[in-house]
């Protein structure tokens, strides 16, 4: 999880719904996001959505099995369903 304390910018309901559908259908996504000054691009398996401290996160697993907590407003490309 990022240590960046920048103010959370809510994402659109349409984008949130895309993540919900991908979780329900167990569809892998190609995501690009920034965190801790780096840009990440990866194929991930979305597992759940989480709200904590007024911020929304996508809980996902990468190809190595690592669990990721990706803040939704850090995603800078529309998810691509694989």
Image (spheres, rainbow, N blue to C red):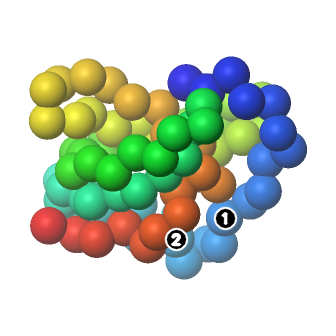
Quadrant location, the N terminus:
top right
Please say if 59 is above or below 82.
Answer: above
Given residues 5 and 28, the one toward you in this image is 5
Given residues 35 and 80, the one toward you in this image is 35
Q: As drawn, is 80 to the left or to the right of 79?
A: left
Query: Which residue is rendered at x = 60% and y = 51% of the image?
Result: 74
Task: Determine whether label 2 and label 1 are within 8 Å by CB.
Answer: yes
User: Badge 1, how many Cα within 10 Å: few under 14, some, many 20+?
Assistant: few
Given residues 76 and 81, the one toward you in this image is 76
Q: As drawn, is 67 to the left or to the right of 62?
A: right
* x and y percentages locating residue 27 in the rendered image: 18, 59
Query: Which residue is rendered at x = 68% and y = 22% of the image?
Result: 3
Q: Secondary structure at mark 1?
A: loop
From where the camera sits, is residue 49 visible?
Answer: no
Instruction: Check disc 1 and report the residue beneath it.
Output: 11
User: Badge 2, how many Cα within 10 Å: few under 14, some, many 20+?
Assistant: few
Task: Please tell me in which quadrant of the rendered image residue 9 appears.
Answer: bottom right
Given residues 81 and 20, the one toward you in this image is 81
Residue 15's mark?
2
* x and y percentages locating residue 56 in the rendered image: 64, 44
Q: Secondary structure at mark 2?
A: helix
Q: CA distance from mark 2 to mark 1?
A: 7 Å
Query: Farthest residue in the bottom direction?
Result: 14
* x and y percentages locating residue 8 in the rendered image: 79, 47
């Amino acid at each position: 999880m990022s240590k960046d304390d920048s103010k959370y910018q809510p994402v659109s309901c349409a984008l949130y719904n895309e993540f919900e559908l991908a979780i329900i259908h167990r569809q892998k996504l190609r995501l690009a996001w920034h965190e801790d000054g780096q840009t990440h691009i990866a194929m991930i398996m979305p597992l759940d959505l989480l709200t904590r401290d007024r911020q929304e996160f996508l809980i996902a697993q990468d190809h190595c099995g690592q669990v990721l907590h990706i803040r939704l407003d850090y995603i800078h490309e529309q998810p691509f369903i694989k």
